[in-house]
Every structure is written in structure tokens, then in C-alpha cells.
Amino acid sequence: MFRKSYIKIFNSIAAAVLSVFLFSPLTSCSSPKLKVAFYQIPESTQKILTEEISTIAGRDVKSITLDPELPLTTKQTKKCDLLFTYNSRSLIDLNPKQISEETLNYLPSKIRYSVIQNNQFYALPILLDNFELAVYSTYANELSLPAPQTYETFKENLIKLKQHTQYPLIVIGSDDVELLGFISAMTQSMYGVNEYFEICSELNKAQLRNEELPYRLRVVLDEIKDLSVKGLIHRGWLELTFKDTEFLMKEHLIGSIATYLRTHRQISFNLIKYYDSYIFPQHTNTQSGLITPEICAAKLSDFSDSERILEELVKNNSQTSLSEKTMLAPAASVAQSSDAQSDDVRYWSASIYGGPVPCLTEASFTSPQQMHVYAAKIREYLKS
């Protein structure tokens, strides 16, 4: 009797152990994996975001890099749960799912309301870039230049710098994204944030109809041509590369550079540490915004864990980690920034009248191909 009971207990334990081995893997394998897509996000930033999301989710996620040269469409993203891309007209056209206001409450109001359309929050800003002006502090101190808080002061500073250095201002004009960043900053500066969005719409309609550059955009380009004629901007700036820029900085031949924060970070620290960053200067009597490409997260499915993951991404620990690793500015209100410059970008975005404003690249074009076509038109006009 004792032996029969022993065998019965042994068989029950064996059956239980076997069921663990047989069914646990099946249960694990059947658990859906979060599919995270990235569009036009640098590879290094993709890796950082994927690692952070995996840590939050407590498991591996499937990372998908969408073709950056194809338009952002529902066909490309139909199998994705979350999408990370720059805030753009194309992102809005995907009609993503609403982000909860509880999650958005971690952000300053100006940043929060940069992703609202038809009373719906269509995305969540995660990290902030900025098209900035960086001034060589050695020359600025020698000449006692005032901070370039207005476009008028900025232009006067360039005139003074011309007597002191070969190139008062440079822009990496050979790169279409840098070119359009500069055009965007100049347009927003000259016309103010409200008219800037009108010009973005005009440019969008022009490329849909294959028309020439809108009139107000040509006025901006004429101002840039005037800077070049006066020798205030490098005459060959449309051909300047990143390597050219570093060389000119090494030779102490420039007074200031207009570029993105992400590009600023790639310049050797031994060179860039002598440059002080400022908001790109605004014309007097215009209401300003800040050209701030935002890396945003958008929900494209009803994946059960998506909202929790997004909320964690904008909490202090994740925001501090993401800012330190990417060296971009955090979007959340109080998270620690990687450095003073990142903190400035967040502060400017949160406090400036018009809040964060997308570049023409994101605000006007329906595809990368159209962006390149109109960048060529802009170069042709500037060279005429």
C-alpha cells in the first residue's frame, strides 16, 4: 500500500514537471512581442531607445528600421505598435492613436501642445533637437560683442566679426537637412511663428503642384544672398561639408556657426568648447518660436503595454538616461539634462512664445525625394 502511494505521488510530480517543460515555452512564445519602428532616426539613437524600451518592458522588443528614403505611410507602418520619428506632417497623416493626457502631463505645456491636432494628442515628444547659433567666445570677448538676442544685433555682430576673422558665419550648406534647418531658422526669424506655419503650408502646396518657391520664402533667400554678398556668411557655404567646418574651426577662421544641436555634438570637443550657443536670433517685433525637431513616439496599435511604456519613457529616470546617452535635450519638465546646453534647449522650448517648431523638412514635405528636389531649387535660387 505504501509503495502504491509512493508511485502515485511520484507520477503526479513527474507529470507536473513535464507540463512545465512542455507548456511554459509555448506560453512564452505565444506572448506578443512589442514591435517598435524607427523612421529617419540615427542608428545610435535607435539603439539607445530600443535598450530603454526593453528595460521598461522587461523583455526584448522587435526593432524595425523603416526605409528613410521612402515616404512615411500606413503601408510602411501597418505592422508596428510604436513609431519613433521626428514630429512631422507625415506623422500626423498616419492618424496615430491618442496619447493619454496623464502621460503628457510630464511635459511642459508648450512642448505638450506641439503635438496636438483637432484636440487630439497624436504623439509624445521624447527628445529635443534645436537649430542654434554658436558664437566663438574668444572673438566675442575680444570685440565685446553683445549677446545676439535679436537679428539686428546678430547682423551688427557679423559686421564687427568681419574685421576680425575671414568667415563671420558658416553653415554646412552641402547637407540638405542642414540647409533647410538654416532656411527654417531664417524664415521663422524674419516672419515670426504664425507666418512661418503659413509659409510651411505654401511650400507644401507648391511641391504638391510642382510649383516654384513661394514668394515669402524667396524674400528670406534674398536676405541670405545679401549676407553672402556682404561677406558676412562664407561665400561658398552651399558647398561646405562637416569636415570643412572642423578644418575652419581648427584654423580659427570663423566667428560663428549655425547648425543643429545633434551636429554640434559631433564636432570635436576641443574645438566646440570655445563656442557659446544661443537661440537663433529673432527679428524685432516678430512673435518667435524655436526650430526644434522633436523625436516623438506615436501609438499605431492597441498593444496592451504601449501606454505604460510611453509613460515610463517620460519619467525622470528614463529621460535623464536618454539625454545623457544621446546628448539631446529631455522633453520632460524636471528630468536632469546631459549638460547646460541641453537644459537650455528644453528651457527655451518650454518658455518661448511659439514653443517648439518643426523644420521645413518635417513641416512641408510629403517625402524625402520632394525635400531633396526643393533643396536643389533653393540652391539654384541662392546661386542666381
Image (spheres, grey):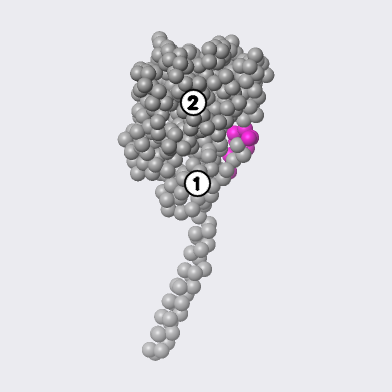
Look at the image and tell me whether residue 136 can be seen. Answer: yes
Residue at x 42%, y 26% (from the top left corner): 136
> Is residue 355 part of the magenta span, yes or no?
no
Q: Image quadrant for the C terminus?
A: top right
- The chief SS type of the magenta part is loop
Query: Measured from the top left, where is residue 233 in percent x and y?
Result: 52, 19
Q: Callout 2, which amino acid?
A: Leu
Q: Horizontal placement of 159 versus 215: left or right?
A: left
Whether 330 is drawn above or below 151: the answer is below
Span shown in magenta: 69-79
Residue at x 51%, y 38% (from the top left corner): 84
Estimate how packed mark 1 is, as few (under 14), some (14 to 19) or many (20 or more) residues with alpha carbons within 10 Å.
few
Look at the image and tell me whether residue 198 can be seen. Answer: no
For the residues marked 2 and 1, what is the alpha-carbon distance in whole angstroms?
Answer: 36 Å
Estimate how packed mark 2 is, as few (under 14), some (14 to 19) or many (20 or more) residues with alpha carbons within 10 Å.
some
Considering only order in the chain, which callout, 1 or 2, is on the residue closer to the N terminus?
A: 1
Query: Measured from the top left, where is residue 25 in percent x and y?
Result: 51, 63
Helix, strand or loop at mark 2: loop
Q: Residue furthest right?
A: 210
> Is residue 75 part of the magenta span, yes or no?
yes
Q: Image quadrant for the N terminus?
A: bottom left
Location of residue 354 (image quadrant) = top left
Q: Horizontal placement of 237 versus 141: left or right?
A: right
Query: Measured from the top left, where is residue 245 in percent x and y?
Result: 52, 30
**Residue that badge 2 annotates:** 253
**Residue that badge 1 annotates:** 47
Helix, strand or loop at mark 1: helix
Whether 257 is drawn above or below 285: the answer is below
Residue at x 36%, y 21% (from the top left corner): 142
Depth-wise, is mark 2 or mark 1 nearer the camera?
2
Using the image as rendered, state which of residue 226 and residue 309 is in the foreground.
Answer: 226
